[in-house]
Image: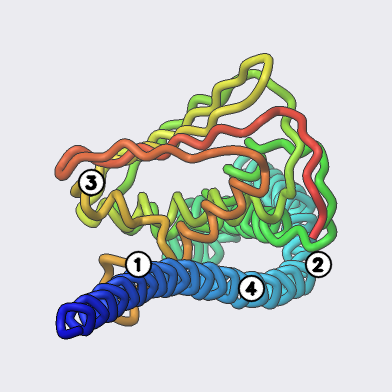
C-alpha cells in the first residue's frame, strides 16, 4: 500500500513539473510576444513622430511660402518702376549733357570764354567732368541694384510657388537657380564658388514647391559645411528613365556614424538653436514621395556629395 502511495505521489509531482514547465514556456512566449509588441509600438511611435514633424514643418513652409509670395508681390511693382525708369533717365541725361556740350562748343567757337569765366570757375570748383562720370556710375549702380532685386523677387516667387500643388512638368534648373538666388548672400559671405553643369533636358514631373524645398535644404547644408569657403558643384544628368541631381561640396564632410543618422528626424550636429534636424529628414520623405532615392558620399575632411535620383515621368499620388 505504501508503494502505491509513493507512486501516486511521484505521478502528482511529475504532473506538477509538467504544469510548471508548460507555465514557464507560456511565460516565455508571452514575454517574447510582449517584447515584439513593444518594438512594434516603439516603431509606430517613431513613425507618428516623423509624420507629426513633417506635418509641422509642412505647415511652417506653407506659412513661409504665403509670406514670401506676398512680399515678392508687394516688392515687384516698385522694383519694376525703378528698372523701367533707369533707361529713360539715362537717355534724358544724355540729351541734357549733349546740350551743355553744344554750349561749350559755341563758347569756344565764338571766343566767349571771358564772358563765361564765372561758369568755368564753378565747373572747375565742382570738377564738372568727374561729376558727369559719377552720375553715370550712380546710374549703373541703380540699374544693377534694380536688376539684382528683380532677380531676387523672381527667385522668391519661383521658390514659393504656392499655385502648383499638382504634379507637373517643371524646369528643375530654374528651381536650382532660384534657390541659389535666395542663398546668394550666404554663398557670398562664406566666399564659396559655385560651379554648375546642367544636362540638356526640358524638365521632369514633380511637385515644384516640394522639389525646391529639397534643393534648398541640401544647398543650405552644403553651404554650412564650408565655414571657411570652398567650392559647390551642382550637376544634373539625364537618361531615358530618369534624372540625377548631384550636389557636392568641399566642406568638412561626415563621419560614418553621422552619415548613418542624417535622415533621422531631429538629428543634428549643429549647436542648440542653430538647427532643428528636420531639413534632411523632410527632404528624404519628399524624394520618396516622388518615387526617387537619395545617396550620400562623404568622408571627414573631404566634403559631401548628395545624389538625388528621380524618374523622369511618374504618377504621384495626391495627398
From the viewer's perspective, tell me whether residue 128 is left or right of residue 257: right
Q: Nearer the viewer, residue 82 or 151?
A: 151
Give the mark nearest the N terminus, 1 or 4. 4
Separation of marks 3 and 1 at Cα, in angstroms: 16 Å
**Any mark on residue 267, and which?**
1
Separation of marks 1 and 2 at Cα, in angstroms: 42 Å
Separation of marks 1 and 4 at Cα, in angstroms: 17 Å
Give the mark nearest the N terminus, 4 or 3. 4
For the point 35% across and 53% down, the residue is 223
Q: How far across and down, in percent of the image, does residue 133 sit?
A: 51, 50
The residue singled out by tag 4 in the image is 55
Q: Which quadrant, please, contains the C terminus?
A: bottom right
**Any mark on residue 77, and which?**
2
The part of the image, by quadrant, that contains residue 204 is top right
**Any mark on residue 253, and which?**
3
From the viewer's perspective, tell me whether residue 241 is left or right of residue 144: right
Separation of marks 4 and 2 at Cα, in angstroms: 34 Å
Q: Nearer the viewer, residue 319 or 205?
A: 319
Q: Is residue 302 visible?
A: yes
Amino acid at each position: 500500500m505504501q508503494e502505491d502511495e509513493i507512486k501516486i505521489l511521484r505521478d502528482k509531482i511529475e504532473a506538477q513539473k509538467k504544469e510548471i514547465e508548460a507555465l514557464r514556456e507560456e511565460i516565455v512566449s508571452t514575454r517574447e510576444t510582449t517584447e515584439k509588441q513593444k518594438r512594434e509600438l516603439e516603431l509606430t511611435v517613431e513613425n507618428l513622430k516623423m509624420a507629426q514633424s513633417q506635418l509641422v514643418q509642412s505647415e511652417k513652409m506653407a506659412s513661409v511660402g504665403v509670406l514670401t509670395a506676398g512680399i515678392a508681390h508687394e516688392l515687384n511693382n516698385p522694383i519694376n518702376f525703378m528698372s523701367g525708369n533707369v533707361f529713360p533717365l539715362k537717355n534724358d541725361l544724355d540729351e541734357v549733357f549733349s546740350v551743355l556740350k553744344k554750349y561749350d562748343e559755341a563758347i569756344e567757337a565764338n571766343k566767349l570764354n571771358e564772358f563765361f569765366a564765372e561758369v568755368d570757375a564753378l565747373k572747375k570748383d565742382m570738377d564738372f567732368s568727374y561729376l558727369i562720370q559719377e552720375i553715370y556710375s550712380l546710374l549703373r549702380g541703380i540699374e544693377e541694384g534694380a536688376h539684382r532685386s528683380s532677380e531676387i523677387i523672381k527667385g522668391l516667387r519661383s521658390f514659393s510657388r504656392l499655385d502648383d500643388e499638382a504634379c507637373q512638368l517643371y524646369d528643375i534648373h530654374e528651381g536650382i537657380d532660384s534657390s541659389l538666388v535666395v542663398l546668394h548672400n550666404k554663398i557670398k559671405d562664406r566666399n564659396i564658388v559655385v560651379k554648375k553643369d546642367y544636362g540638356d533636358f526640358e524638365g521632369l514631373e514633380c511637385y515644384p514647391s516640394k522639389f525646391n524645398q529639397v534643393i534648398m535644404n541640401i544647398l543650405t547644408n552644403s553651404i554650412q559645411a564650408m565655414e571657411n569657403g570652398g567650392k559647390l558643384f551642382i550637376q544634373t544628368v539625364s537618361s531615358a528613365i530618369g534624372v540625377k541631381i548631384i550636389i557636392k561640396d568641399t566642406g568638412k564632410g561626415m563621419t560614418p556614424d553621422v552619415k548613418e543618422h542624417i535622415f533621422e528626424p531631429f538629428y543634428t550636429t549643429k549647436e542648440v538653436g542653430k538647427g532643428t534636424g528636420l531639413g534632411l529628414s523632410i527632404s528624404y520623405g519628399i524624394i520618396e514621395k516622388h518615387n526617387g532615392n537619395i545617396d550620400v558620399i562623404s568622408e571627414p575632411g573631404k566634403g559631401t556629395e548628395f545624389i538625388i535620383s528621380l524618374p523622369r515621368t511618374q504618377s504621384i499620388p495626391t495627398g
